[in-house]
Image (spheres, coloured by chain):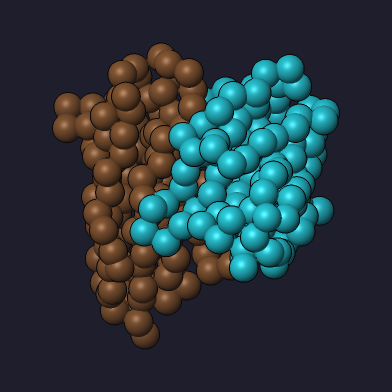
Chain colours: A cyan, B brown
């Protein structure tokens, strides 16, 4: 089984809808991250969490919120989706500054 | 702040050609350096890393050397294969700072038979 899983893998939604993307990990890492990937822009950090009680905004947090329900679970919400949030979203985990382990990604289309 | 600059792509090569993808960085502390690879339809995965100056990371025929004097971590492979076609990301994680990773924009590699 994969160490980092994301659900759903693909999602189509309409402008104004609230959606949640979920991430679970079995690596036992304290640190978890949410990124979005857009063509030509690489990876941009949305939110990150160093443990269950520590959540921080990243480079592009506007329009997003997160919840760290447990060490193993980190969810990303779009409160009111808009078309420019169409992107590929990745969850990742790590131990301090070491290697990041990525999930397979969620492809989101906002119409 | 920290930043990573890598060459823009796509890089298009014939099979068995030599590959170099340039990566330079700026960091406020003393970073660890990484190359990640993203195959089509998948998430990123670690290709190689180096944690101190002059270290060489290597994996699957790819190599990169941590050059502190030139703040560079260029990726090389002597003979690429069609299966190496992917997007390659250079990244750093600053151990002297908040440990938040910084990624380059990625370089697409296309290898033709």
Above or below, comparing residue A88 to residue A56 in the picture: below
**Where residue A27 appears, x then y in whole percent?**
74, 36
Q: Residue at x 51, y 57 (%)?
A: A84
Residue lying farthest left? B70
The count of marks equals: 0
Residue lying farthest bottom? B113
Quick one: A111 or B28, which is closer to the camera? A111
Whether residue B43 appears in this view of the structure is no
Quick one: A96 or B113, which is closer to the camera? A96
Left or right, residue B19 beside residue A11: left
**Where residue A7 appears, x then y in whole percent?**
77, 55
Left or right, residue B46 beside residue B69: right
Quarter of the image for residue B12 reads: bottom left
Left or right, residue A47 beside residue B4: right
Quarter of the image for residue A74 reads: top right
Q: Residue at x 74, y 52 (%)?
A: A19
**Where residue A110 appears, x then y in whole percent?**
62, 63
Whether residue A1 appears in this view of the structure is yes
Q: Residue at x 74, y 40 (%)?
A: A75
Above or below, comparing residue A8 to residue B89 in the picture: below
Residue lying farthest top? B96
**Where residue B97 appears, x then y in whole percent?**
43, 16
Above or below, comparing residue B12 to residue B52 in the picture: below
Q: Residue at x 64, y 60 (%)?
A: A15
Q: Quarter of the image containing the C terminus of chain A?
A: bottom right
Left or right, residue B76 beside residue A31: left
């Amino acid at each position: 089984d994969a160490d980092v899983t994301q659900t759903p893998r693909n999602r189509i939604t309409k402008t104004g809808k609230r959606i949640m993307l979920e991430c679970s990990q079995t690596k036992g890492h304290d640190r978890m991250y949410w990124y979005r990937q857009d063509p030509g822009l690489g990876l941009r950090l949305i939110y990150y969490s160093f443990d269950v009680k520590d959540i921080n905004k990243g480079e592009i947090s506007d329009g997003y919120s997160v919840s760290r329900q447990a060490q193993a679970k980190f969810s990303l919400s779009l409160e009111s989706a808009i078309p420019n949030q169409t992107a590929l979203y990745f969850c990742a985990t790590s131990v301090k500054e070491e290697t990041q382990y990525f999930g397979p990604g969620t492809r989101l289309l906002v119409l | 702040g920290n930043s990573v600059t890598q060459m823009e792509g796509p890089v298009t090569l014939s099979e068995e050609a030599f590959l170099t993808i340039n990566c330079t960085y700026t960091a406020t502390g003393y970073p660890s350096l990484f190359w990640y690879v993203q195959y089509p339809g998948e998430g990123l995965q670690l290709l190689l890393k180096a944690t101190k100056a002059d270290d060489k990371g290597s994996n699957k025929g790819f190599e990169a050397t941590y050059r502190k004097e030139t703040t560079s971590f260029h990726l090389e492979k002597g003979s690429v294969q069609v299966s190496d076609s992917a997007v390659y990301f250079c990244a750093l994680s600053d151990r002297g700072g908040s440990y938040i990773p910084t990624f380059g924009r990625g370089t697409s590699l296309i290898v033709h038979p």
